[in-house]
Image (cartoon, rainbow, N blue to C red):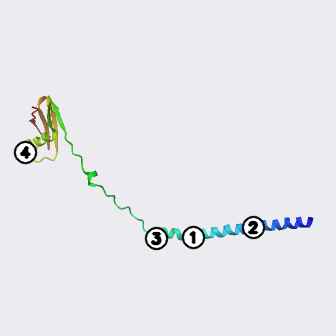
Amino acid sequence: MATTKKAAAKAEKETKKTTKTATKAAAKAAEATEEKAAPVKKAAAKKAPAKKAAPKKTDAKKTAEANVNFFVEFGGVQVSVADVVANVKATYGKDAKEIAVYLKPEESKAYFVADGEESEMDVFFC
């Protein structure tokens, strides 16, 4: 029985050594395979052209400006700001690149600067 135990222990040690050696060899083989495969993958990735994202399409509804109606009310009477601007343009008499309007309802006046020229006009709140 003693020889059987010794033989079994010796066989077990040999198996462990063989297993360790086989594991180390397999690990080295795997590392070598990974090292060889990695450059190939990098080269393939470099050769492939990068895809550009397609330009985003915007809906005409989203980009359209909101229609704004702006009124000034004084003494129970409303005056549309669009009407005031139209009257300022008519009073100025020619197309202006830049217009600034200062509305003073208590005086029933609109003071404006069109292309650097100052002027005024009456605004009727009646």
N-term-proximal mark, 1 vs 3: 1
Q: Mark 1 = which residue?
A: 37
Query: Three-letter amino acid code at disc 3?
Result: Lys
Q: Is residue 116 above or below residue 37?
A: above
Q: As shown in the figure, which amino acid type bears the numbered disc 2?
A: Thr
Q: Which residue is at a point 26% across and 54% down the rendered structure image?
A: 60
* Label 3 element class: helix
Residue 90, can we see it?
A: yes
Residue located farthest toward the right when viewing the structure as drawn: 2
Q: Is 45 or 56 nearer to us in this picture?
A: 56
| Residue topped by disc 3 | 47
Residue under the point 61% across and 70% down: 33
Number of the front mark, 2 or 1: 2
Q: Quadrant of residue 2?
A: bottom right
Q: Is residue 105 above or below residue 56?
A: above
Quadrant containing the N terminus is: bottom right
Q: In 3D space, how far apart are the residues under numbered discs 4 and 2 (Cα atoms)?
A: 101 Å
For label 2, the residue is: 19
Disc with the residue nearer the chain's start (2 vs 1) = 2
- The amino acid type of the residue labelled 4 equals Gly
Q: Cα distance, mark 2 to mark 3?
A: 42 Å
Callout 2 secondary element: helix
**Cα distance, mark 1 to mark 3?**
16 Å
Q: Residue 93: which disc?
A: 4
Tell me residue 42's x, y (percent): 51, 68
Mark 4 vs 2, N-terminal side: 2
